Image: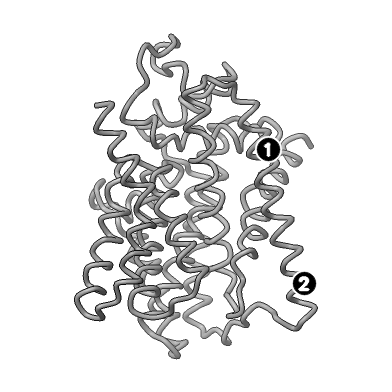
Amino acid sequence: MRMVIKGLLAAFWLAAVPASAGLLFAGRKQLKIPDLFLHGYLLLFAAMEILVLPMILLKMPLHVLTSVYGILAAGFAAGGLLLWKKKNSSKNQLAKMERPSVYFWMAVLVIVLQVLMCAAMAHMDADDCFYVAAAATDVHTDSIFAVDPYTGCEYRTLPRRYVLSPFPVFLAVVSQLSGGLHPAIMAHMVFPVIFLPMAYMVQYCLAEKLFSGERKAKDIYLLLAACICSFSGYSVYNAGNFQMVRIWQGKAVLASVLLPYLLYLCISIFFGEKRKNLWAALFLANISSCLLSSMGIILAPLMTGCFLVSSLVMQRDWKSAAKGLLCCIPSIILGIAYILIS
């Protein structure tokens, strides 16, 4: 019974809260459920990054971060629901999905099988000795990146490779919010159930750009993406392997979720729509990438900059270029900080 309660709490904090927080981005144009869920996670990941960094430097305990993040996340969710209720009263509802084809349901079947395999047959990755152990150490010592998980001794100097991208702290926080569910269980059994479908939500969004107005083509694309990922174990370096084998690690979420979604946002903004909530999402995506991995500090502004320059050359839109540059400022600041502490 206790594990059931913890599971329900995990579903609340990792599914219900992000989905509700994403409603804050529902502007005049109707957004689909994948967009709202992904936007909600951008907001929560960015909030975690902003909260964690000063608390690490101030050597604050984990329970303080857990309380502050929990209140903030619940506030975002409540605000999203209130905003949705207000807009719903004026008949502004979520965009309805087109009628799916048989290929869509085949893709769903493949994705469900992948989720069950990842959760029930969890792979014990060598990198877990740091990522999962760091979260377990923070929970056990009630600290934030203060104790080396390898030795159990306090850090003399902060680990520069990880301190600016403290995704293990996110794991520790949601484990505590989920009734004290062990970080290893959260990482190996719960995170795949959340982040693996998120990766396919991103693919669905990309399919919207590639095959606009062609529902059957979108569904075939999604099925093809799921099948290719199922056979991506030929190398330990490709994004598909990261997605299937170690989706609970920050760098895997970066490769399979955040960077593809950043690609989608850049295409939408620089060569399509110019909605204000998309600019906010791009800004949050750059911060969120920093939380997940130190490579995100480099790759997120690099990808944004490539689209920014392409848009500037093709469209001469200096206003959009300036906004795009502003979205990259958090990553640039953390990149400079990474160099200085090296």
| Tag shown at residue 257 | none
Q: Nearer the viewer, residue 292 or 191?
A: 292
Residue 225 location in percent, x, y?
Answer: 37, 69
User: Compared to 223, does 37 lie above or below?
Assistant: above
Q: Nearer the viewer, residue 90 or 238?
A: 90
**Amino acid at the residue labelled 1:** Ser
Instruction: Please give left or right for residue 315 compared with residue 40 in the image.
Output: left
Residue 307 location in percent, x, y?
Answer: 27, 68
Residue at 26% x, 81% y: name it. 315
Residue at 43% x, 90% y: name it. 214
**Distance from the alpha carbon under mark 2 to that under mark 1:** 30 Å
The residue wearing badge 2 is: 86
Quarter of the image for the C terminus: give it: top left
User: Compared to 65, does 242 lie above or below?
Assistant: below
Residue 92 location in percent, x, y?
Answer: 70, 81
Q: Residues within 10 Å of mark 2 (few under 14, many from 20)?
A: few
**Amino acid at the residue labelled 2:** Lys
Label 2–label 1 contact, CB within 8 A: no
Residue at 30% x, 54% y: name it. 301
Say which of marks 2 and 1 sits in front: 2
The residue wearing badge 1 is: 178
Q: Quadrant of residue 20?
A: bottom right
Instruction: Please give left or right for residue 208 compared with residue 303 in the image.
Output: right
Q: Residues within 10 Å of mark 1 (few under 14, many from 20)?
A: many
Residue at 31% x, 34% y: name it. 337
> Element at badge 2?
helix
Residue extending farthest left: 313
Mark 2 and mark 1 lie on one chain; the one further toward the N terminus is 2
